[in-house]
Image (cartoon, rainbow, N blue to C red):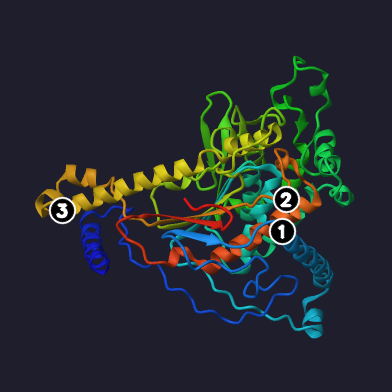
Amino acid sequence: MAQISASASARVADFAADVGTANLVAPSRKLGARNPDIDRAPRRGRPDPGGASNSGALSNAEAPGISLWTGDGPDYMKARVAALDLRTKEDDMNRAETDRPEAAIADDIPVPQRPRKGRPNAGQIVLVFQGGGALGAYQAGVYEALHEAGVEPDWVIGTSIGAINASLIAGNVPERRVARLEEFWRRVSQDSVFDLFSNLPWFGRSLPNWATLTSGVPGFFEPNLLAFLGLHTRLAPEAAGYYSTKPLGATLSELVDFSRIERCAPRLTVGAANLRTGEMRYFDSRDMALTVRHVMASGALPPAFPAIRIDGDLYWDGGILSNTPVEAVFDDMPRRNSLVLAVHMWRPESNEPENIWQVMNRQKDVQYSSRALSHIRRQKQIHRLRHIIAELAMKLPQAERESAIAREMAAHGCLTQMHVVQLLAPRLDNEDHTKDIDFSSAGIKARWAAGYDDAKRALEEAPWEREVDPLEGFHWHELRRMSMEAL
């Protein structure tokens, strides 16, 4: 491997100098050295990411490119929810303190600052968020762990609820992003009184979801009474949905600074489906000024929500075409070395269902996982072909390599390194096909806690720092729990 790495790096450098394409970046065999463990003082109101974890340690017995996590199940989730409840109470006290002048706080209690590990040395950092309604609380927890570790994304891509979370990140300064996410999810959570009945069989667990269906979700959507007059009742195209999303527009307008999104720090991309053409459209802050309507279009899931009109065309939720918008990264030009954190909420694999209730749950998982793994495997093959083109071009004699036709063909080569890390939300105890409308306070806290823990463990494991074959180019890291069988 060492000989391969040395010779490959030499050939890459030589070819990049000759061809000079934007995509030809000489790879290194090891993309960064892991930082040594350091003592970290906990920040007030947040758990210490360097401390002991309730969820168990990462397994050292791994297949190449696959990390197996230990810890799962109801006891794990209850422990994390309890921790999140405590953290929420501490945050409330801390916010009360921060309303006072900074000098008063400094005189009262010195706030210890925890050193941060910092950014991974793997190129641009990209967050890719699936759609999934209430399951999106998992994504918020993922971002919180990244933020505490000092890892801010360069690019956030989302569909549906993923687009909403992405806009809350891109539309705020780093210091306010977690608070804005917390505020959004606090507003859309059902009254905690429903949690008192959650342990009752059948009806108790369904009560928050029935409240969502009948009354909507505060700050998100509300019933459109005209739609309930009959399936053939004529409605305006922008009002043809069982619910109105005007409350979501008001919420996002308050919590997101869209003028900041124009700075592309980070870049924001949201996916929506063109109702007229049936094609996917990615609205990108690099290419246009994004507004609240672009985010709302990405989450306009029919027939619940009405389409959103942009530049004369109506758009629906991008999840009906591609609920995992990772292709936006691989199709981007010019390509760059990237660490892509693909945050998935729908499970592509499961046991065989044994009743209709389980069938409905499994059907939804299969539908909205959106062939994520097959898309990624296909991109891996395509990226490998790009590396082969670059390798073959380097074998040409110097005279032929400088010809116009050779340079044109060589431009299709690419030597960028792509590390894709999948973070997959765990199943909650007794969840079913209505999980994406589970806006109960307990459900949101549990999923947020799971995302926080998963991202924290991913940063500690740092699979992108392992030695890799630079000729491969595309590296898939599937970080999964021991309860799931590795591919």
Q: Which of the marked residues, 2 or 3, is nearer the chain's N terminus?
A: 3
Q: From the viewer's perspective, is 339 left or right of 441?
A: left
Label 3 and label 1: CA atoms lie apart by: 55 Å
Label 2: how many Cα within 10 Å (few below 14, some 14–19, many 20+): few
> As displayed, is residue 110 above or below residue 287?
below
- Look at discs 3 and 1 and give the one toward the viewer: 1
Question: Which secondary structure lies at badge 2?
Answer: loop
Residue 300 visible in the current orientation: no
Residue 37 position (above or below residue 74):
below
Foreground pick, 59 / 347: 59
Q: Position of residue 45 (x, y in %)?
A: 75, 71
State left or right for residue 210 relative to residue 325: right
- Quarter where residue 445 is shown: bottom right
Q: Position of residue 277 (x, y in %)?
A: 52, 24
Name the spot of residue 487 as percent of width and height, x first.
47, 50
Numbered circle sitting on residue 86: none
How far is disc 2 from disc 3 in space, using C-alphas? Answer: 57 Å
Amino acid type assigned to the residue bearing label 3 in the image = Lys
Question: Quick one: label 2 or label 1, which is nearer the N terminus?
Answer: 1
Marks 1 and 2: in contact by CB < 8 Å? yes
Asked if residue 444 can be seen in this view, the reply is yes
Query: With respect to residue 62, does 240 lie above or below?
Result: above
Q: Secondary structure at mark 1?
A: helix
Where residue 395 is drawn, which disc sits there? Answer: 3
Marked residue nearer the N-terminal end (3 or 1) = 1
Which residue matches tag 2?
429
Q: Nearer the viewer, mark 2 or mark 3?
A: 2
Residue marked by disc 1: 77
Q: CA distance from mark 2 to mark 1?
A: 8 Å
Pick whichever, 247 or 344, lies toward us: 344
- Residue occupying image coordinates x 83% and y 47%: 190
